[in-house]
Image (spheres, rainbow, N blue to C red):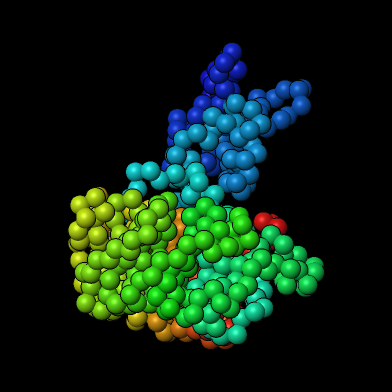
């Protein structure tokens, strides 16, 4: 940096003081030791952040939380806002903290700024969950193993289903860590007659909850009207998985079928392209992805109305996570498998042994972390990259963990120890 810096940082009308970060070479970060003493201009005016050389300012920013930079510092003035408009700064920041390839699969719509915020926040929270989270077990009105948990409304509402036929709905915003009685006060709804069989699957769209059970029924519940049941659909087998979106329900059936329901109609349609029970299901606007005991994953093309691709597995899928052009599979052997779903290729990338000693019962991918559960009683929080090492392992359950839910930083687990594990980051309360 030489005397020409005066021109760079001078403020012209309608322009920011600093150039956008994509015009700054920070591939290896900013090193203020390269700044010569002659480069620093002295003045009798008070020294403020906006008068610092850009190298020093960017160096300081590396020690501040990404969330603070976006939500606070960038809003101080136009000059600071211009510093963080490019992906270059955020890519470099992530690479310096976590050098492994990220994201695991290329995504045209990937937002590096948001990814940096959630990665830093997830790493901060899940590196030391005992100190960064409020953690407790919910056991009210639960008398049998819990098989389904679901978070909605930005992580403030938690629904659960268990083998005692109870459907419970909790308002987590009512939890007060200083008041043990607040755990009971969280209950919004609890009914042991919600279904006549084990409640095995839950999903939601806006303020409507959808439940699936071994009694062969799929039911819709209106949370705006006191969690009132307002519709139900009779299927021909137990429902083991549900995807629920506006005007469409897809469900995984024990009878090897995938059920398709338009809530505006009364008809229940079904398609069969598996030879054994369908255990898990996920969907986006193009594909319905199902995993079955027949050791296959079927990719159904919604527009073409037929199976687009069938993937053969060595061990059948217990759960799948499908988003961000990625398909993650948790299998019976306790492993994770990654498939590149970009451009519809569903190409196998790698199989990972993440350290589970039992079946992998749940998997959730997010840009901040990957969450897995197992019959070995553990939950693992993994780095969301091409080589997902463990950030932490949670050993709080005393029996197999059957399912996970994660939304807005809140984690919930379904336990065979007749409980629901709940982790709420302290700063969210």
List x then y, in percent, for residue 192: 58, 78
Can you see residue 327?
A: no
Task: Give residue 68's quadrant in the image.
Answer: top right
Answer above or below: position of 229 versus 357: above
Answer above or below: position of 225 versus 34: below
List x then y, in percent, for residue 215: 43, 78
Q: Residue at x 60, y 85 (%)?
A: 143
Can you see residue 213?
A: yes
Locate residue 10 relative to residue 336 in the image: left or right.
right
List x then y, in percent, for residue 106: 33, 50
Locate residue 276 relative to residue 2 in the image: left or right.
left
Q: Residue at x 49, y 80 (%)?
A: 196
Answer above or below: position of 363 versus 375: above
Q: Nearer the viewer, residue 122 or 144?
A: 144
Q: How many marks?
A: 0
State the quadrant of the C terminus.
Answer: bottom right
Q: Nearer the viewer, residue 191 or 344?
A: 191
List x then y, in percent, for residue 384: 44, 60
Q: Residue at x 55, y 54 (%)?
A: 207
Task: Give residue 32's quadrant in the image.
Answer: top right
């Amino acid at each position: 940096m030489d005397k020409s810096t005066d021109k760079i940082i001078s403020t012209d009308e309608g322009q920011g003081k600093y150039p956008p970060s994509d015009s700054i070479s920070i591939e290896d970060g900013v090193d203020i030791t390269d700044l010569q003493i002659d480069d620093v201009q002295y003045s009798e005016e008070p020294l403020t952040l906006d008068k610092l050389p850009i190298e020093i300012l960017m160096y300081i920013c590396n020690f501040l939380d990404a969330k603070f930079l976006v939500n606070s510092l960038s809003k101080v003035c136009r000059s600071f806002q211009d510093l963080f408009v490019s992906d270059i700064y955020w890519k470099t920041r992530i690479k310096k903290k976590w050098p492994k390839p990220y994201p695991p699969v290329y995504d045209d719509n990937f937002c590096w700024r948001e990814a940096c915020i959630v990665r830093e926040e997830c790493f901060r929270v899940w590196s030391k969950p005992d100190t960064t989270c409020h953690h407790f077990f919910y056991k009210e009105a639960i008398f049998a193993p819990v098989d389904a948990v679901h978070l909605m409304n930005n992580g403030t509402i938690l629904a659960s289903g268990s083998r005692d036929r109870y459907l419970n709905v909790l308002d987590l915003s009512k939890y007060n860590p200083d008041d043990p009685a607040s755990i009971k006060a969280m209950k919004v709804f609890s009914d042991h007659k919600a279904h006549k069989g084990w409640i095995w699957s839950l999903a939601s769209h806006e303020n409507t909850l959808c439940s699936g059970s071994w009694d062969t029924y799929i039911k819709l519940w209106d949370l705006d009207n006191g969690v009132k049941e307002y519709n139900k659909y009779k299927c021909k087998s137990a429902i083991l998985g549900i995807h629920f979106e506006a005007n469409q329900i897809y469900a995984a059936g024990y009878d090897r079928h995938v059920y398709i329901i338009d809530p505006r109609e009364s008809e229940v349609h079904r398609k069969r392209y598996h030879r054994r029970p369908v255990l898990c299901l996920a969907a986006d606007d193009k594909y319905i992805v199902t995993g079955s005991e027949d050791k296959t994953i079927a990719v159904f093309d919604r527009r073409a109305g037929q199976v687009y691709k069938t993937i053969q597995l060595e061990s059948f899928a217990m759960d799948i996570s499908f988003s961000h052009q990625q398909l993650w599979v948790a299998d019976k052997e306790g492993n994770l498998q990654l498939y590149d779903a970009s451009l519809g290729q569903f190409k196998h990338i790698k199989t990972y042994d993440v350290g589970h000693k039992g079946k992998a019962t749940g998997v959730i991918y997010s840009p901040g972390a990957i969450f897995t559960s197992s019959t070995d009683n553990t939950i693992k929080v993994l780095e969301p990259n091409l080589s997902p090492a463990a950030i932490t392992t949670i050993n709080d359950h005393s029996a197999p963990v059957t399912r996970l839910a994660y939304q807005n930083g809140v984690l919930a687990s379904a336990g065979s120890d007749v409980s629901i594990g709940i982790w709420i980051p302290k700063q969210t309360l």
